[in-house]
Image (cartoon, helix red, strand yellow):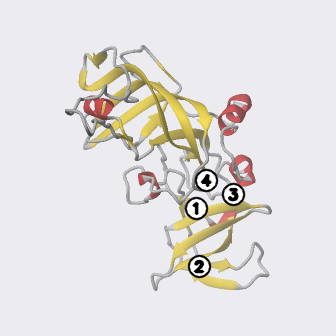
């Protein structure tokens, strides 16, 4: 089963001013954009789970991506699959800020990923987080995607890939918990302002690295059951770039195109990254 489940770093610099001709005088500290923590609740049956009350505003990158879960019991091809999908959100605080107080409560050196949730059950002792947006929530999806300057047609139509937008966000209701060796920070989020900034892929977001835990959550891999031509275009009459050996399990879906074809990429036997087109019916869901 492909689970793209689903968590960011803010640095804030303080400053002091001193008069040059007078004895040094410490000026009032600047207002640091930290959450005014009201209280911290610990879940009775799990001391590693905390709900942190407070609100902050921070600049950063908002990531929206489609989480795709294949739940079929029997093997199916991409053409046959009917996955469950939700639009998920993550927020990456700008590296020019540091949420030191929040990081301390979260038990991490810095907060570089914040997973976004919509609501909860039995707050503040939360057993279940309501995250993401179903494809049927058309009004809610329209509101979420309205803050993004550039949303490719395929992102909406085929529910694949990701979009990124620099924003100023208000975050509140922080949740911190530990799972194995990993610490997660969740928050509710509302965008207060869209900002100008670099395009997606031009910003050093940790989760853009596929080797990061939970990195590239939009990435989907499939296998081929028999020798499959990787073609230059979406059609059986186009040139063959290379052939994918039977049993290849690292075929990455890039984009869907009309007519039952998919643009994919794969590393061939010589270690070269090759891209091309294959029919949806040739790709098998990896469970």
- Cα distance between the residues tagged 1 and 3: 9 Å
Label disc, if present, on residue 206 of the rendered structure: none
Is label 4 or label 3 in front?
4
Neighbor class of circle 4 (other Cα within 10 Å; few <14, some 14-19, many 20+) is many
Q: Residue beneath label 4, please?
A: 161
Q: Residue beneath label 3, please?
A: 79
Instruction: Give the mark, 2 or 4, whose residue is nearer the N terminus.
Output: 4
Query: Can residue 130 be seen by looking at this rendering?
Result: no
Indicate the position of residue 279 as horizontal and vertical percent values.
Answer: 70, 68
Instruction: Give the mark, 4 or 3, whose residue is nearer the N terminus.
Output: 3
Indicate the position of residue 32 as horizontal and vertical percent values.
Answer: 37, 29
Q: Residue beneath label 1, please?
A: 284
Residue at left 40%, top 29%? 33
- Element type where label 4 sits in the image: loop
Instruction: Give the mark, 2 or 3, whose residue is nearer the N terminus.
Output: 3
Is label 2 or label 4 in front?
4
Q: Residue beneath label 2, please?
A: 227
Going by the image, does 143 lie left or right of 60?
right
Neighbor class of circle 2 (other Cα within 10 Å; few <14, some 14-19, many 20+) is few
Residue 172 position by quadrant: top left
Along the line of sight, the residue nearer the viewer: 33 or 38: 33
- Cα distance between the residues tagged 4 and 3: 18 Å
**165 versus 202 height, above or below:** above
- Cα distance between the residues tagged 2 and 1: 13 Å
Going by the image, does 232 lie left or right of 215?
right
- Cα distance between the residues tagged 2 and 4: 27 Å
């Amino acid at each position: 089963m492909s689970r793209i489940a689903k968590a960011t770093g803010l640095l804030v610099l303080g400053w002091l001013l001193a008069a040059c001709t007078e004895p040094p005088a410490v000026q009032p500290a600047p207002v640091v954009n930290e959450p005014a923590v009201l209280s911290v609740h610990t879940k009775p049956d799990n001391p590693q789970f905390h709900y942190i009350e407070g609100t902050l505003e921070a600049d950063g990158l908002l990531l929206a991506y489609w989480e795709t879960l294949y739940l079929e019991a029997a093997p199916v091809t991409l053409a046959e699959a009917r996955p469950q999908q939700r639009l998920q959100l993550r927020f990456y605080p700008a590296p020019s800020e540091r949420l030191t107080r929040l990081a301390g409560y979260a038990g991490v050196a810095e907060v570089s990923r914040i997973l976004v949730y919509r609501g909860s059950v039995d707050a503040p002792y939360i057993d279940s987080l309501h995250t993401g947006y179903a494809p049927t929530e058309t009004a809610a999806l329209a509101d979420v995607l309205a803050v993004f300057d550039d949303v490719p047609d395929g992102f909406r139509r085929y529910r694949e890939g990701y979009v990124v937008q620099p924003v100023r966000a208000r975050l509140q209701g922080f949740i911190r918990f530990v799972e194995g060796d990993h610490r997660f920070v969740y928050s509710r989020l509302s965008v207060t302002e869209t900002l100008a900034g670099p395009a997606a892929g031009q910003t050093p977001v940790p989760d853009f690295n596929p080797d990061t835990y939970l990195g590239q959550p939009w990435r989907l891999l499939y296998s081929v059951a028999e020798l499959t031509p990787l073609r230059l275009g979406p059609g059986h009459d186009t040139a063959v770039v290379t052939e994918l050996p039977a049993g290849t399990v690292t075929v990455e879906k890039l984009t869907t195109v009309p007519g039952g074809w998919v643009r994919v990429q794969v590393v061939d036997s010589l270690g070269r990254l090759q891209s091309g087109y294959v029919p949806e019916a040739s790709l098998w869901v990896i469970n």
